[in-house]
Amino acid sequence: MTTKKILIKGLGADVTEAAVRSRLNRFGLVVQVDIVREGNVADPSALVEMDIGDKAAEYLVFRMSSIWHDDTVVSAQLLNH
């Protein structure tokens, strides 16, 4: 396994590092979560570093919208694939 960086958008203004970590822990070890609120405070992004394999990272990015909020469109992008 290697460290993967995942950029997540559309999490909502009230998102916290703890919430992101809690949701993603079942997919692998979450090393770091940074919430980026610069630019648009109402629509922050999360930069997540995880120690997971390639297939697990691809699956996580594919499933991202269905594991967060049912009423919110979430997008994820694997940055170092």
Image: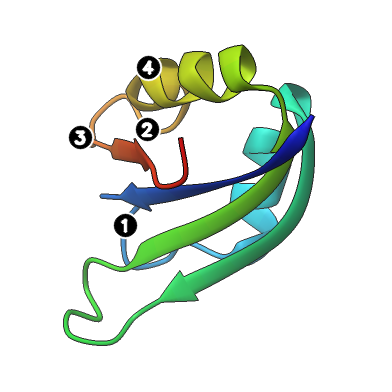
Q: Which residue is mark 3?
A: 73
Q: Nearer the viewer, mark 3 or mark 2?
A: 3
Q: Earlier in the sequence, mark 1 or mark 4?
A: 1
> Residue at image x 70%, y 23%?
53
> Residue at image x 31%, y 57%?
12
Q: How many marks?
A: 4
User: Residues at badges 3 and 2 in contact (C-beta under 8 Å)?
Assistant: no
How many residues crowd around disc 3 within 10 Å: few (fewer than 14), some, or many (20 or more)?
some
Inter-mark Cα distance, 4 to 2: 15 Å
Inter-mark Cα distance, 1 to 4: 19 Å
Q: Amino acid at mark 2?
A: His
Position of the N terminus by quadrant: top right
User: Residues at badges 2 and 1 in contact (C-beta under 8 Å)?
Assistant: yes
Q: Amino acid at mark 3?
A: Val
Inter-mark Cα distance, 1 to 3: 10 Å
Q: Amino acid at mark 1?
A: Gly
Q: Earlier in the sequence, mark 4 or mark 2?
A: 4
Inter-mark Cα distance, 4 to 3: 13 Å
Per the rendering, the mark at residue 62 is 4
Q: Earlier in the sequence, mark 1 or mark 3?
A: 1
Q: Which residue is mark 1?
A: 12
Q: Amino acid at mark 4?
A: Phe
> Residue at image x 56%, y 25%?
57
Q: Which residue is mark 2?
A: 69
Q: Nearer the viewer, residue 72 or 21?
A: 21
